[in-house]
Amino acid sequence: MASPTPDADRSALAELHAAWMSAVAASDAESLRALVTDDYEVFANAAPAIVGPDAVVSGMRAALDRYRVQQRFDPIETVIAGDWAFERGIESMTATPVSGGAPQTRSQRALLILRRGADGRWRYARGMTNGLPVASSSSPTAS
């Protein structure tokens, strides 16, 4: 079997992101299980760590029962090193309450560590998010 090319790996990572966002948009938390490693762990901004596929599914199910969510991930940097990939970028999401109400939009920085499994598929292995800096409304003035 030939080794994947960098372009094939980048396409596979983009497909993984698309599969995650599609599952979330469809409120299908169970589909997320197949997209993470068995030892998955993510540090979400200002929240306890999410560890393992069961925690992903139950946490997302609880969120998706309350909100319809649209996500986007805009990579800034992607590094592929063998069976590991590291991506940093901006994650944006809009959450609309199922019970009605105004949508809430939020963007944050994300660092993703992905691992290719023995089956050749890329999955999320680790991650961390944190908020973006607050935009300043003032500008420097000349003296």
Image (spheres, rainbow, N blue to C red):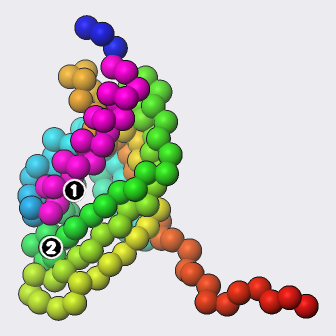
Please provide percent x and percent y for residue 88. 47, 50
Amino acid on which disc 1 is placed: Met
Q: Which residue is mark 1?
A: 21
Amino acid on which disc 2 is placed: Arg
Q: Is residue 76 left or right of residue 55?
A: right
Q: Quadrant of residue 45?
A: bottom left
Residue 7 within the magenta-colored segment of the rendering: yes
Does dot 1 land on a helix, a strand or a loop? helix
Residue 95 within the magenta-colored segment of the rendering: no
Report the Cα–Cα distance between label 2 and label 1. 12 Å
Q: Residue furthest top?
A: 1
Q: Nearer the viewer, residue 69 or 10?
A: 10
Identify the residue at image location x=24%, y=29%: 121
Which contiguous range is marked in magenta? 4-25
Q: Which residue is mark 2?
A: 68
Quarter of the image that includes the N terminus: top left
Please provide percent x and percent y for residue 26. 9, 61
Please provide percent x and percent y for residue 61. 13, 64
In the image, residue 125 above or below residue 74: above
Magenta-highlighted stretch: main secondary structure? Answer: helix
Quarter of the image that includes the C terminus: bottom right
